[in-house]
Amino acid sequence: MSETPYRIDLDSVRKAFPLWLEAPPVLVDFAAWLEGRAWGGVGCFDLVGQFSENAPLFDSSLLRNEFALFMRLPDGSAVGTWYPDAGNAELAPVVLIGSEGQHKILAPSLEGFLAKLASLQFENSDLHPHEEADDQTDELAAWLRKRLGVKDLGIVVQARQPLPDFADAMHKWCRDREAFWSDHPGLKALSAPLISHRPAGKNAWDRTHFEVAIVGAHSEIRVLRRGRQAVEEAEAIEPILRDLRDEMWRGIPISACGIPWHSPFTRTDVSCRVSTMRPGRRSMNCPPILRRQRPTSIAPRGRHAGYRLGSPPDLSIPRGSHPEQ
């Protein structure tokens, strides 16, 4: 196996944490320990942060302050800390948001997660060392015992208090959000003007992709078809998208966002992914209109500056259905 090192983006890890919380020192120290080590030695993952809306979880933009997703697995799954009582850092189990709908608690705490990683307790998963890599879990265990000041890592794996049912909480969240959007008037209004963009294919997963950016009085609406093309229906759908943006913005805690909005979405399915800007970092894949404009409001966050892109829910209508039917 190649000696390719772990991919580590500590900046994205720090910014993946809720606005009310900094990245824990033990996680930052783990990133330093992992730096330069061959990929697969303690598990198959990238230490890269992402926002909850980019995880495989339906309409998770409103959960921004409840997750700190600091690890990505090869299959697209996300691993991170869950804060079911947002604002309380004491209750913070590490969870898996699986790419195939798995939702489970991996450890009662970040320290417990690293201890389980070091003691090979994630067998038959991507969190186990790669079979062709040199196992470095003994080194991790020695470092972690010294870092935590304990002789037995089994102590930190134990939960100090009962943990909530993460799978049940996420399944209920997805059911409730799907029900909310299934008959949403904005979705029906958006679908009708874009009927001509329905995919020509017969597969249920066929999509037509659009991209929208709105900042103040400025807007750009493009269909992603052999590059970014102008949308003839832009004038008709812009007011609908603005109303949808405002509705989503009102539902997100004021500390989590500002006004500018970048929204990729797909048609039929009409799937809208709503994104807001917030202080922290320049938005990834940000359209030029968002780079040119200043936001009309910015939420404070201490030492951080710049903008951050996030908050996309998926609003979908199954292929073959029509809002008027």
Image: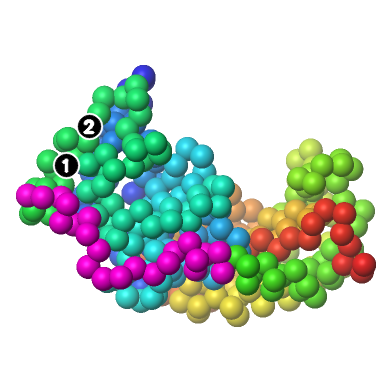
Viewer-proximal residue, 226 or 156?
156
Q: Is residue 145 visible?
A: yes
Position of residue 43 in the picture relative to residue 227 (left or right): left
**Residue under the point 66% across and 61% down:** 314
- The residue wearing badge 2 is 136
Task: Work out which quarter of the rendered image holds the N terminus and state it.
Answer: top left
- The residue wearing badge 1 is 141
The answer to which quarter of the image holds residue 26 is bottom left
**Residue under the point 18% across and 57% down:** 156
Q: Is residue 14 visible?
A: no
**Residue under the point 34% across and 68% down:** 163
Task: Work out which quarter of the rendered image holds the C terminus and state it.
Answer: bottom right
Mark 2: amino acid? Gln
Q: Measured from the top left, where is residue 247 in percent x and y? A: 67, 77
Residue 267 located within the stretch drawn in magenta: no
Q: Measured from the top left, where is residue 157 in percent x and y? A: 22, 55
Circle nearer the N terminus (1, 2)? 2
Mark 1: amino acid? Ala
SS for dot 2: loop
Which residues are drawn in magenta?
151-172
